[in-house]
Amino acid sequence: MSQFTFITGGARSGKSSFAELLAAHAKRPVIYIATAQIWDAEMALRVKKHQLQRPATWRLIEEPRNVRETLIKLKDEDGVILLDCVTLWLTNLLLAGQSQPVTPSCPDGEKFPLDLQNDNDSFNNELEPQILDIVKNVAQLAQEIKPQVIFVSNEVGQGIVPENPLARAYRDLAGRSNQILAQSAEQVYMVVAGFPMEIKHSGEKLLASLLKE
């Protein structure tokens, strides 16, 4: 069974750098799963900077959507899997149907439509539960497979409420997905201004004491 670590934080908080330090500290082969898709020159530059800061010996897998299938393929690897990041993965799942009539397959092979601008109820009742089921399956795999697993995510709901349905749907999906992954993880860190804080064990103690009252 792997040691699953979940790391979250705001933009430019230092979460990716911390995750890379953790992965390197294990002194084992590292497999880096990149979920970003390059659509323009600015994104290409961001990806290039990330590549330059990582050791050249790390194995790279570029996988924007099929994280579950990728983890299954890597389940017997003797090393560390570092996925960066969860929120880009969710973005890819959420937007996959914007320019096409269907979105990526669910774990059982079914596909689902997406038109949030015209039918927000479809997201709340159909699409979000299906994506969250994928997240739950991935969270379980991250616990069970042989390699150590590190996921990096973002806290996206700490600003103002977005003005359009798609942005609000994404904010809610990211928050709920982070909760699912954090529940499954053995260790959870929040990175603020470059400094990591371990939050799961102290939070569990507080919740347990409140629930007893």
Image (cartoon, rainbow, N blue to C red):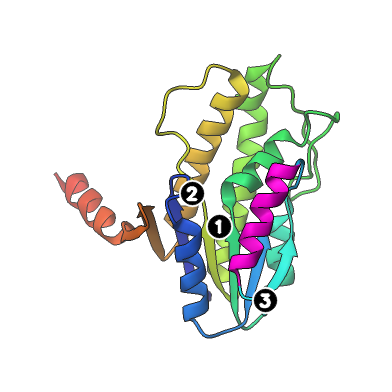
Q: What residue is shown with label 2?
A: 180
Asked if the stretch drawn in magenta spans residue 47, the answer is: yes
Residue 82: x, y in percent? 58, 66
Q: Nearer the viewer, residue 97 or 84?
A: 84
Residue 117 vs 181, above or below: the answer is above
Do callouts 1 and 2 mark residues in contact (Cβ within 8 Å)? yes
Label placed on residue 139: 1
Q: What residue is shown with label 3?
A: 56
Q: Nearer the viewer, residue 56 or 133?
A: 56
Near mark 3 (Cα within 10 A), the count class, few <14, some 14-19 or many ≥20, is: few
Residue 133 visible at all: no
Q: Which residues are magenta?
A: 41-54
Classify mark 3: helix, strand or loop: loop
What amino acid type is highlighted by mark number 2?
Ile
Q: How far is the residue under mark 3 from the one under mark 2?
A: 32 Å
Q: How far is the residue under mark 3 from the one under mark 1?
A: 28 Å
Q: Nearer the viewer, mark 3 or mark 2?
A: 3
